[in-house]
Image (cartoon, grey):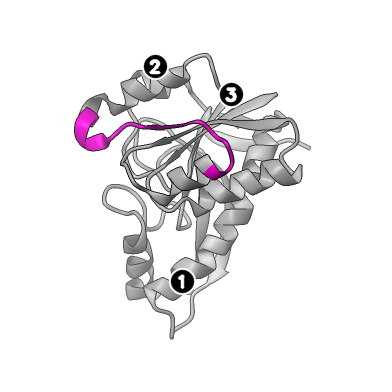
Amino acid sequence: MFKIAVLASGGGTDFQSIIDGVESGYLENCSIEMLISDRPGIHAIERAKKHGIENKVLDSKVYGAGLSDEILKLLHGKVDLIVCAGWLSILQGKLISEFKNKIINIHPSLIPSFCGDGMYGIKVHESAVKKGVKVSGCTVHFIDSGTDSGPIIFQKAVPVYFEDTAGDLQKRILKEEHRALPRVIKLVSQNKVSVIQGRVKIGK
């Protein structure tokens, strides 16, 4: 069984896409072992409870810079992949090295555009609309010691229309996020993803 832990900071719609992938059989031989949230009271926790998934709250206001170490204590030797699904805290330290190329994140833009420090949530889409780009999208990438700088696994583009608000663009991209994240998890679970000199190769 390919074991997954999910990290989430909000409503958990990306988390739900993983749950749906497991329960539908699309993510065969995969199990969600735990949800970890960095703040109490978020809806992602309710999703975990509804589907019988163990959940832990590691409040970022309590743990601060030690948050990544606490996550490592919970997950070391217990899961094959960590999935950041709407996770806002920065991961660092031994967690990154112990889970090298085993932590993935989904970002709501086509990296390297509109990413890095301070670029998260609706801010990403506000920046894209303000800049007037004609295409945006989502990126699934491995996490490394930087911010949104790890090897890119998969990207999906969507059009940006002149009339779009940031909210319009967010909804359009979110639909693609919900397809992209289970797709990448499936590829990783099938050992079809390899990192070669900082670039990702997808096997057949």
Q: Residue at x 37, y 45 (%)?
A: 9
Residue identifier under label 1: 169
x, y percentage for residue 103? 49, 31
Name the amino acid type tagged 3. Answer: Asp
Q: Is residue 55 magenta?
A: yes
The answer, for residue 181, to whether it is visible in the render is no
Relative to 171, say whether 27 is above or below.
above
Q: Residue at x 20, y 36 (%)?
A: 61
In magenta, the rendered stretch is 50-64
Residue identifier under label 3: 80
Which one is in front in this view, the residue at disc 2 or the one at disc 3? 2
Relative to 14, say whether 100 is above or below.
above
Between the C-alphas of marks 2 and 3, the distance is 15 Å
x, y percentage for residue 87? 39, 43
Name the amino acid type tagged 1. Answer: Leu
Q: Residue at x 26, y 36 (%)?
A: 60
Label tally: 3
How busy is the neighbourhood of tag 1: few (under 14 within 10 Å), some, or many (20 plus)? many
Residue identifier under label 2: 73
